[in-house]
Image (spheres, rainbow, N blue to C red):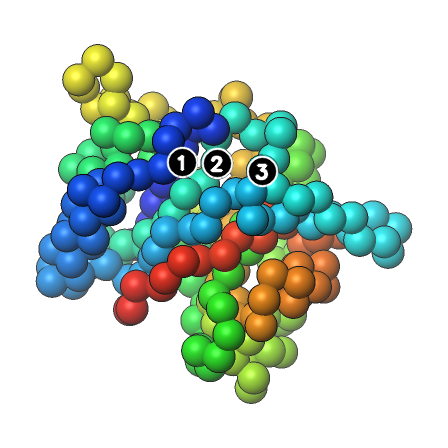
Amino acid sequence: MEFLLLFNERKSTPPPEEAGLAAMKKYAGELRNQGVFRRGGPLAPASAGAGVRVRDGKAFVTDGPFAETKELVAGFWIVDVADRAEALEIARRCPHAQRGPIELHVLRDRYTFTDSENGTAFLLAFRMEPGLSDPDGTKLREMIAFAQAFEPEGTIFEIAPLGDDPPAARIEAKAGKVLVTDGPFAETKEMIGGYSLVRAKGRAAAIELAERYPHARWGPVEVREILFLDPL
Protein backbone atom coordinates (compact mmCIF):
# COMPACT_ATOMS: atom_id res chain seq x y z
CA MET A 1 0.00 0.00 0.00
CA GLU A 2 1.24 3.47 -0.83
CA PHE A 3 0.86 6.35 1.61
CA LEU A 4 1.45 10.08 1.41
CA LEU A 5 3.10 11.81 4.36
CA LEU A 6 2.52 15.56 4.48
CA PHE A 7 4.89 17.47 6.75
CA ASN A 8 2.98 20.44 8.15
CA GLU A 9 4.32 23.45 9.97
CA ARG A 10 2.59 26.20 11.91
CA LYS A 11 3.10 29.70 10.59
CA SER A 12 4.99 30.66 13.74
CA THR A 13 7.50 27.81 13.35
CA PRO A 14 11.00 29.07 12.42
CA PRO A 15 12.81 27.53 9.44
CA PRO A 16 14.42 24.15 10.15
CA GLU A 17 18.03 24.08 11.28
CA GLU A 18 20.74 22.22 9.39
CA ALA A 19 20.68 19.42 11.95
CA GLY A 20 16.97 18.87 11.37
CA LEU A 21 17.38 18.75 7.61
CA ALA A 22 20.27 16.31 7.96
CA ALA A 23 18.16 14.06 10.21
CA MET A 24 15.35 13.99 7.64
CA LYS A 25 17.80 13.21 4.83
CA LYS A 26 19.33 10.38 6.87
CA TYR A 27 15.94 8.88 7.71
CA ALA A 28 14.84 9.06 4.06
CA GLY A 29 18.02 7.22 3.14
CA GLU A 30 17.24 4.48 5.65
CA LEU A 31 13.76 4.06 4.20
CA ARG A 32 15.17 3.97 0.69
CA ASN A 33 17.59 1.22 1.70
CA GLN A 34 14.62 -0.71 3.11
CA GLY A 35 12.87 -0.39 -0.26
CA VAL A 36 9.84 1.53 1.04
CA PHE A 37 10.69 5.12 0.05
CA ARG A 38 9.26 6.09 -3.34
CA ARG A 39 9.86 9.81 -3.67
CA GLY A 40 9.45 13.13 -1.87
CA GLY A 41 11.10 16.40 -1.01
CA PRO A 42 10.92 19.70 0.86
CA LEU A 43 8.85 22.58 -0.48
CA ALA A 44 9.84 26.20 -0.92
CA PRO A 45 8.24 28.59 1.62
CA ALA A 46 4.51 29.10 1.21
CA SER A 47 5.19 32.80 0.62
CA ALA A 48 6.48 31.78 -2.82
CA GLY A 49 3.44 29.61 -3.54
CA ALA A 50 0.06 30.41 -5.03
CA GLY A 51 -3.57 29.36 -4.78
CA VAL A 52 -5.49 28.92 -8.04
CA ARG A 53 -9.26 28.80 -8.53
CA VAL A 54 -11.34 29.00 -11.73
CA ARG A 55 -14.91 30.32 -11.53
CA ASP A 56 -17.15 30.80 -14.56
CA GLY A 57 -14.15 30.42 -16.84
CA LYS A 58 -12.08 33.10 -15.08
CA ALA A 59 -8.93 32.22 -13.15
CA PHE A 60 -8.25 33.76 -9.74
CA VAL A 61 -4.73 33.55 -8.31
CA THR A 62 -3.88 34.25 -4.67
CA ASP A 63 -0.25 34.67 -3.64
CA GLY A 64 1.00 32.77 -0.61
CA PRO A 65 1.21 32.54 2.31
CA PHE A 66 -2.45 31.65 2.77
CA ALA A 67 -4.12 33.64 5.53
CA GLU A 68 -6.96 31.16 6.04
CA THR A 69 -4.58 28.26 6.66
CA LYS A 70 -3.21 27.76 10.19
CA GLU A 71 -0.69 25.16 9.04
CA LEU A 72 1.37 25.05 5.87
CA VAL A 73 2.74 22.03 4.03
CA ALA A 74 6.54 22.05 4.24
CA GLY A 75 7.28 18.81 2.42
CA PHE A 76 6.04 15.36 1.46
CA TRP A 77 7.09 11.72 1.19
CA ILE A 78 5.51 8.73 -0.52
CA VAL A 79 6.15 5.33 1.03
CA ASP A 80 5.12 1.84 -0.03
CA VAL A 81 4.47 -0.45 2.95
CA ALA A 82 2.45 -3.49 3.95
CA ASP A 83 -0.31 -1.67 5.84
CA ARG A 84 -1.38 1.45 7.75
CA ALA A 85 0.33 0.29 10.95
CA GLU A 86 3.71 0.24 9.22
CA ALA A 87 3.09 3.68 7.69
CA LEU A 88 2.16 5.04 11.12
CA GLU A 89 5.36 3.65 12.60
CA ILE A 90 7.39 5.40 9.90
CA ALA A 91 5.61 8.67 10.71
CA ARG A 92 6.14 8.24 14.46
CA ARG A 93 9.88 7.74 13.96
CA CYS A 94 10.20 10.60 11.48
CA PRO A 95 12.28 13.51 12.84
CA HIS A 96 9.66 15.99 11.61
CA ALA A 97 7.15 14.64 14.16
CA GLN A 98 9.15 16.47 16.85
CA ARG A 99 8.85 19.70 14.90
CA GLY A 100 5.31 19.73 13.55
CA PRO A 101 2.29 17.59 12.63
CA ILE A 102 2.43 14.89 9.97
CA GLU A 103 -0.68 13.95 7.99
CA LEU A 104 -0.83 10.39 6.72
CA HIS A 105 -3.09 9.54 3.75
CA VAL A 106 -3.49 6.35 1.76
CA LEU A 107 -3.25 6.69 -2.03
CA ARG A 108 -6.17 5.25 -3.99
CA ASP A 109 -3.90 4.91 -7.01
CA ARG A 110 -0.71 6.54 -8.19
CA TYR A 111 -0.33 7.24 -11.89
CA THR A 112 3.25 7.90 -13.00
CA PHE A 113 4.51 9.08 -16.37
CA THR A 114 7.87 9.93 -17.90
CA ASP A 115 9.62 12.80 -16.15
CA SER A 116 11.34 15.03 -18.68
CA GLU A 117 13.44 16.52 -15.82
CA ASN A 118 13.34 19.76 -17.80
CA GLY A 119 12.40 22.70 -15.63
CA THR A 120 11.52 23.11 -11.98
CA ALA A 121 9.44 20.51 -10.16
CA PHE A 122 6.21 21.70 -8.52
CA LEU A 123 3.64 20.05 -6.30
CA LEU A 124 0.02 20.86 -7.16
CA ALA A 125 -2.17 20.06 -4.15
CA PHE A 126 -5.85 19.65 -4.95
CA ARG A 127 -7.85 20.93 -2.00
CA MET A 128 -11.43 19.82 -1.40
CA GLU A 129 -14.13 22.37 -0.68
CA PRO A 130 -17.04 21.31 1.56
CA GLY A 131 -19.70 19.44 -0.41
CA LEU A 132 -17.42 18.45 -3.29
CA SER A 133 -18.04 14.82 -4.24
CA ASP A 134 -17.41 12.42 -7.09
CA PRO A 135 -19.82 9.51 -6.59
CA ASP A 136 -19.38 7.96 -10.03
CA GLY A 137 -15.71 8.79 -10.56
CA THR A 138 -16.35 11.22 -13.43
CA LYS A 139 -14.12 13.93 -11.98
CA LEU A 140 -11.30 11.49 -11.31
CA ARG A 141 -11.41 10.15 -14.86
CA GLU A 142 -11.28 13.70 -16.22
CA MET A 143 -8.24 14.46 -14.06
CA ILE A 144 -6.40 11.32 -15.15
CA ALA A 145 -7.16 11.94 -18.83
CA PHE A 146 -5.87 15.51 -18.50
CA ALA A 147 -2.59 14.31 -17.00
CA GLN A 148 -2.17 11.53 -19.58
CA ALA A 149 -2.44 14.05 -22.41
CA PHE A 150 0.85 15.60 -21.22
CA GLU A 151 2.74 12.28 -21.14
CA PRO A 152 4.56 12.81 -24.48
CA GLU A 153 6.21 16.02 -23.24
CA GLY A 154 6.91 14.88 -19.68
CA THR A 155 5.36 17.99 -18.13
CA ILE A 156 3.06 16.09 -15.76
CA PHE A 157 4.83 13.06 -14.37
CA GLU A 158 2.61 11.96 -11.49
CA ILE A 159 -0.95 12.29 -10.25
CA ALA A 160 -2.70 10.53 -7.38
CA PRO A 161 -6.05 10.78 -5.60
CA LEU A 162 -6.09 10.22 -1.85
CA GLY A 163 -8.29 7.53 -0.33
CA ASP A 164 -10.25 7.30 2.91
CA ASP A 165 -9.90 3.58 3.65
CA PRO A 166 -7.89 3.13 5.78
CA PRO A 167 -8.61 6.53 7.34
CA ALA A 168 -6.15 9.41 7.39
CA ALA A 169 -4.16 10.09 10.53
CA ARG A 170 -2.44 13.02 12.18
CA ILE A 171 0.82 12.36 14.00
CA GLU A 172 2.08 15.00 16.41
CA ALA A 173 4.44 15.21 19.39
CA LYS A 174 2.93 16.68 22.57
CA ALA A 175 4.47 16.72 26.04
CA GLY A 176 7.18 14.35 24.94
CA LYS A 177 4.77 11.79 23.47
CA VAL A 178 3.95 11.14 19.83
CA LEU A 179 0.16 11.06 19.52
CA VAL A 180 -1.94 9.70 16.65
CA THR A 181 -5.38 11.11 15.82
CA ASP A 182 -7.57 9.42 13.22
CA GLY A 183 -9.22 11.56 10.55
CA PRO A 184 -11.24 13.16 9.20
CA PHE A 185 -10.04 16.39 10.76
CA ALA A 186 -12.91 18.72 11.61
CA GLU A 187 -10.64 21.77 11.95
CA THR A 188 -9.52 21.50 8.31
CA LYS A 189 -11.96 23.18 5.92
CA GLU A 190 -10.09 22.35 2.72
CA MET A 191 -8.35 18.99 3.03
CA ILE A 192 -6.08 17.81 0.26
CA GLY A 193 -7.88 15.28 -1.91
CA GLY A 194 -5.01 14.51 -4.27
CA TYR A 195 -1.88 15.91 -5.86
CA SER A 196 0.11 16.12 -9.06
CA LEU A 197 3.84 16.49 -9.70
CA VAL A 198 4.70 18.66 -12.68
CA ARG A 199 7.61 20.34 -14.44
CA ALA A 200 7.48 24.00 -15.43
CA LYS A 201 9.88 26.71 -16.56
CA GLY A 202 8.95 28.77 -13.52
CA ARG A 203 6.23 29.80 -11.10
CA ALA A 204 4.13 31.55 -13.74
CA ALA A 205 4.12 28.47 -15.98
CA ALA A 206 3.19 26.22 -13.04
CA ILE A 207 0.29 28.52 -12.17
CA GLU A 208 -0.89 28.46 -15.80
CA LEU A 209 -0.87 24.66 -15.75
CA ALA A 210 -2.82 24.65 -12.47
CA GLU A 211 -5.43 26.91 -14.06
CA ARG A 212 -5.93 24.34 -16.82
CA TYR A 213 -6.30 21.39 -14.46
CA PRO A 214 -9.98 20.34 -14.21
CA HIS A 215 -9.87 20.48 -10.41
CA ALA A 216 -9.44 24.27 -10.49
CA ARG A 217 -13.12 24.46 -11.51
CA TRP A 218 -14.15 22.45 -8.43
CA GLY A 219 -11.81 23.67 -5.71
CA PRO A 220 -8.52 25.41 -4.94
CA VAL A 221 -5.21 24.21 -6.34
CA GLU A 222 -2.17 25.02 -4.22
CA VAL A 223 1.00 25.53 -6.29
CA ARG A 224 4.27 24.87 -4.44
CA GLU A 225 7.81 24.61 -5.73
CA ILE A 226 9.75 21.48 -4.72
CA LEU A 227 13.25 22.49 -3.59
CA PHE A 228 14.67 19.12 -4.58
CA LEU A 229 13.02 15.87 -5.51
CA ASP A 230 14.42 12.71 -4.00
CA PRO A 231 14.67 9.95 -6.61
CA LEU A 232 12.44 6.91 -6.83
Circle 3 — which element? Answer: loop
Residue at position x 62%, y 28% from top?
68
Of the residues under marks 2 and 3, which one precedes in the sequence? 3
Q: Kindly identify which residue carries mark 2.
A: 72
Say which of 54 and 145 sits in front.
54
Q: Kindly identify which residue carries mark 3.
A: 65
Residue at position x 30%, y 63% from top?
230
Label 2 amino acid?
Answer: Leu
Say which of 185 and 178 sits in front.
178
Check if mark 3's residue and mark 1's residue have beta carbons within 8 Å. no
Q: CA distance from mark 2 to mark 3?
A: 8 Å
Residue at position x 18%, y 49% from top?
22
Check if mark 2's residue and mark 1's residue have beta carbons within 8 Å. yes
For the view shown, which residue lies furthest in the right direction?
Answer: 56
Residue at position x 57%, y 30% from top?
69
Rendered position, 185 above or below 231: above
Residue 225 coordinates in the image, percent (x, y): 50, 57
For the view shown, which residue lies furthest in the top direction?
Answer: 175
Of the residues under marks 2 and 1, which one precedes in the sequence? 1
Q: Kindly identify which residue carries mark 1.
A: 8
Mark 2: give few (<14), some (14-19) or many (20+) Cα within 10 Å: some
Circle 1 — which element? Answer: strand
Q: Is residue 213 left or right of residue 152?
A: right
Residue 187 coordinates in the image, percent (x, y): 52, 21
